[in-house]
Every structure is written in C-alpha cells, then in structure tokens.
Amino acid sequence: MIKQPLAVDEVVGGAADRYAALGFQTRGDLGQHFLRTMAAAHALLERAGIPSGAHVLEVGAGLGTLSSVIAAAGHRIWAVEKDERLHDQLTERLAPFGDRARVTFDDVRRVDLDGGLDPGSALVSIMPFDPELSADLIRHVLASPRVEYGLVVVPRASAEMLARSADLAVEEVDGIARSSFWPPAPTVLRVLAISRRSACSS
C-alpha cells in the first residue's frame, strides 16, 4: 500500500507538456486531460496491485503514458482511445511492446470487451474528467464478466455517483493532484478501487 498520496513529479517535459507547448486543443466533450509524468503512472500501477502478466484494459489511453508503464511492467495492455488525432502518438508509444500491447480507436461502449479480454482482466484508467461520462463508462466496463476489478482516477462527483451503485463495490484508496494533468484537472480527483459486488462475495 502506498503511504504517500499520489503527486506530480517535479520533473516535467513529458508527452503532455510537449503537446501543450505545441498548442494541442484538448476535447472537452471527451473530458480529455493527459497525465504529465511517468512517476504518477508508476504510482497508479503500484496502487492497482495487478497480478503478474494480467490482462489490463485502459479506457481513454490518450498519449500512452500509463499504457506504456503497464506494458513495461510485463502486463498485456489493451489501450482503447476515442480521439483519432492521437493515433500516431499512441501506436508509436506502444509499438516496442509488440503483442503485449493492443490499441483500438473507438468508443469503448462499441467494443466487444467479452471477445477481447481474458477472464480476470483489470480496468486501470484515468477516466474522462466529465463526471457523468466517467461513471457511465466504468459501469459499462464492469458489466463485462471478463473484467474482475479496476483502479480508476475519476472526478469526486463520479466517485459519489458510483458509490451509490448497488452492484458495485467502491473504495476510495487515494487522491491525485490536479497538477498531475494537462490541462490541470478542473475539479478534485479520487483514485478508486472498484469491482462488482458479486465478484467480491463469490
């Protein structure tokens, strides 16, 4: 268990900062914000506690910062991203991992998760910073019997919505600094461990 709260690394200059310097326009309709440092990605992966070699789904993979850390740790990553503008960046970032990394450009709600994931897969994602969209996507993914549990970064309002779900077990395990993202997160964020209640009680 991580004792220190997740925070932005003081050393910047990663992909998110380069995109900011280039004047890239993030999409508000996607709740789009990019993780700025590898250190924050490593901290999230450590917090997730994924078994060695497990299959991991990432929704909203963005620039591939978290995806590449997951793949580098030996896990198989399925990175799903809706914004086609990020195609070259994301595919190039994950190309070195070969068959361990799969990239799909689509809305995750149109993707055949049951056909593409192994039983016992994990969701590890920085969800859109739109509270309702974030909660909806998480509910959709956890409805797949192939996804056993997840670790997600969400706005506080999403955490409150999900906590009211009768079929989900939700535990707040950390927070993360707004400045860990570009653009900075517009609201307080929470890091949640989440699973289906049936999975917890079985």
Image (tube, rainbow, N blue to C red):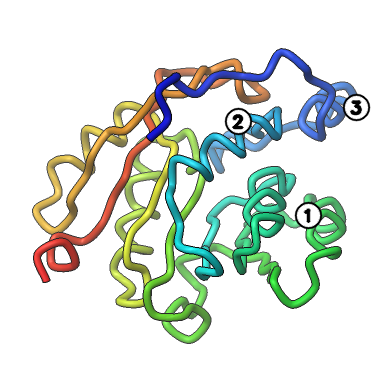
Q: Nearer the viewer, residue 9 or 46?
A: 46
Q: Residue at x 44, y 20 (%)?
A: 5
Q: Amino acid at mark 3?
A: Leu
Instruction: Relative to 37, say whether 41 is above or below.
Output: below
Image-based side of 12 in relation to 167, left or right: right
- Kind of residue at disc 2: Ala
Q: CA distance from mark 1 to mark 3?
A: 17 Å
User: Residue 95 location in percent, x, y?
Assistant: 84, 65
Residue 109 quadrant: bottom left
- Residue at 79% over, 51% down: 85
1 or 3: tag closer to the N-terminus: 3
Other-residue count near label 1 (Cα within 10 Å), few / some / many at <14 / 14–19 / ≥20: many
The answer to the question of whether label 1 and label 2 lie on touching residues, with beta carbons closer than 8 A, is: no
- Characterize the local packing of mark 3: few (<14), some (14-19) or many (20 or more) Cα atoms within 10 angstroms: few
* Eye-nearest disc, 1 or 3: 1
Foreground residue, 30 or 17? 17
Helix, strand or loop at disc 2?
A: helix
SS type, badge 3: loop
Q: Indicate the secondary structure of the residue bearing disc 1.
A: helix
Q: Amino acid at mark 1?
A: Leu
Residue behind mark 2: 40
**Residue at the location (82% across, 54% down)?**
93
The correct choice, above or below, for 161 with respect to 200 in the image is above
**Is residue 107 rendered to the left or right of residue 38?**
left
Residue 192 in percent (x, y) is at 33, 39
Question: Which residue does the image show at 32% across and 67% down from the upper left?
Answer: 148
Numbered circle sitting on residue 90: 1
Marks 2 and 3, how far apart at CA: 22 Å
Disc 3: which residue: 22
> Mark on residue 158?
none
Which quadrant holds the C terminus? bottom left
Query: Which comes before the other along the chain, label 1 or label 2?
Result: 2
